[in-house]
Structure formats: C-alpha cells, structure tokens
Image: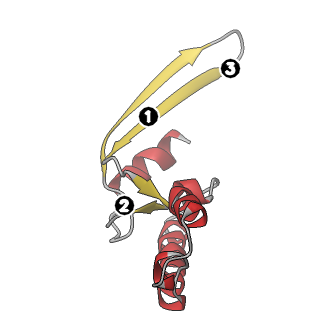
Amino acid sequence: MVGLSTERAKLKHRNFCTIRNYEIDQSQDFCSNRYVIRLYFDYHTNDLEKEVARRAESKVPADLSQKYFSEEWIGAALFGLVSCLRCLEERGCYQGDIKSGNVLLDS
C-alpha cells in the first residue's frame, strides 16, 4: 500500500489531480503494522456529485443545457475517467473508490 501511494504521487496524467506532497505514518501494535497515508493535492470546489445535485435542484431554465448534461459532456467525462483508470492499471495501481464525489470538476 505504501509503495502504491508513492507510485501514485509520481504519476502524471492530464486528468489526475497533481499530488503536491504526501506523508506516511507507521505505528506498530501488538502484532501488526498500521499505516496512515495522507495525500495533499489542489483543492477543487466542485465535484460531479455536487454538480448533479445543483442541477437537480434548479428550476427548468429556458436553456436546458443548464439543467442537463449534454451527450458530448458525458462522453468527454467518461473518456477522461476511463483514460485515468487505464493509466493507473498499466502501472499496477487501482482506484478502489470510484464515485461521483471523487470525480473532481474544474470550470
């Protein structure tokens, strides 16, 4: 796990958040080791979960693109996500927590 985290910190991809720093703390209990890994990256104010909720709460505007995602947007988002996952898999890393709250959006 520690090796994977340090490898992930080195990965570069246009759709990855840049990891600015990381810390690894290790503690030993009676018969086991415990690792706490902290990754530090740029803060994003919006993610897919928040964006879906924002659009669901809004009234239906005259311009429906403000309420619904376009097919082009969905295709580009899926392509970016799959591209990231493929990059990770090629290097032996895996993302075990794919959810809308972890898909960060920029403007």
Residue positioned 50% across, 62% down in the render: 51
Secondary structure at numbered mark 2: loop
Secondary structure at numbered mark 3: loop
- Residue 103 image position (x, y, % from top left): 51, 61
Residue designated by label 1: 38
Residue positioned 56% across, 75% down in the render: 60
In terms of sequence position, does the residue under pointer 1 or pointer 3 come before the other?
Answer: 3
Mark 1 vs mark 3: give the one in front: 1
Res. 30 image quadrant: top right
Residue positioned 55% across, 79% down in the render: 68
In terms of sequence position, does the residue under pointer 2 or pointer 1 come before the other?
Answer: 2
Residue located farthest toward the top when viewing the structure as drawn: 30
In terms of sequence position, does the residue under pointer 3 or pointer 2 come before the other?
Answer: 2
Say which quadrant the C terminus sits in: bottom left
Mark 3 vs mark 2: give the one in front: 2
The colour scheme is secondary structure
Say which quadrant the N terminus sits in: top right
Disc 1 versus disc 3: distance between alpha carbons?
20 Å
Q: Give the residue type that dot 3 points to.
A: Ser
Question: Which dot marks residue 50?
Answer: none
Q: Return the residue nearer the eye: 92 or 78.
A: 78
Residue designated by label 3: 32
As drawn, 20 above or below 24? below
Left or right of 30? Residue 60 is left
Question: Which dot marks residue 11?
Answer: 2
As drawn, 24 above or below 12? above
Disc 2 versus disc 1: distance between alpha carbons?
16 Å
Q: Return the residue nearer the eye: 71 or 16.
A: 71
- Residue 98 image position (x, y, % from top left): 62, 59
Secondary structure at numbered mark 1: strand
Q: Give the residue type that dot 2 points to.
A: Leu
Q: Return the residue nearer the eye: 57 or 38.
A: 57
